[in-house]
Amino acid sequence: MAGMARIASHRLEQAKAALLAELRLEVRDRRLLEAMSRVPRERFVPPEVQPYAYDNRPLPIGYGQTISQPLIVAVMTEALGLRGSEKVLEIGTGSGYQAAIVAELAAEVVTVERVAPLAERASLVLADLGYRNVHVHAVGDELGWPEEAPYDAILVTAGAPGVPRELVDQLAGGGRMVVPVGGRDLQDLLRVTRRATGISVERLGPCRFVPLVGRGAWPDGAEPSS
């Protein structure tokens, strides 16, 4: 059994090295790549898909949710422009993987999740890995975590029908939000910056996420049935 475990571990390390080599072709932020090399993605997925943890694709984590493709995790995190002192809000904890990567690059991460068992599992994994600067909250219909606003950056890991006003209001002046906006099946990834005169919006490219559910987004029950 010990020999098999060593072989499995070696294969994961090889797959991780190959993934990082692939990401280096797309990602310029060296700090981000180093953070992704430190975070064990296999800890954030169910045992049955751990052999595929470093495939550059989303994987199921239960409850109709997925852990995002590593490339999209990198693109979204890089777009926040983190320097190390920020307080970041993440909408949609999911597995906790992206929260861990952001925690490597920012001072504090507040992350919220509607699916309570996912929030609990992510909290346990993050704590076990030593991420003391990540705070996981199970939430209902309200978007975000206004109690600790304002945030220097907000990362939204589900697709919204428009830029959520509720989240813009939780941004600090000059703060950035990366959010998928569009239909329930396909969205554009946007970087929204809060300025004194309103917001500015940059398009980063097409993407596909599960719907963002809550006040100011899709109503509960709007998720696709497939």
Image (cartoon, rainbow, N blue to C red):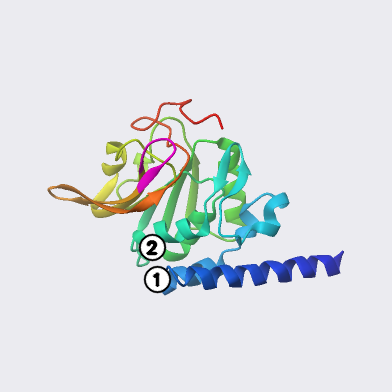
- Label 2 neighbour load within 10 Å: few <14, some 14-19, many 20+: some
Residue 185 part of the magenta-drawn span: yes
- Residue type at mark 1 is Asp
Secondary structure state at the residue bearing disc 2: helix
Front position in the image: 168 or 13: 13
Give residue 29's mark.
1
Of the image marks 2 and 1, the number of the one nearer the N terminus: 1
Q: Quadrant of residue 12?
A: bottom right
Going by the picture, which residue comes out furthest to the right? 1
Estimate the x, y position of residue 150 in percent, counting from the top left.
29, 48
Which residue position is annotated with label 2? Answer: 78
Q: Quadrant of residue 6?
A: bottom right
> Residue drawn at (54%, 55%), measured in percent from left and top?
97
Going by the picture, which residue comes out furthest to the left? 197
- Label 1 neighbour load within 10 Å: few <14, some 14-19, many 20+: some
Q: Quadrant of the N terminus?
A: bottom right
Estimate the x, y position of residue 110 in percent, counting from the top left.
43, 49
- Residue type at mark 2 is Glu
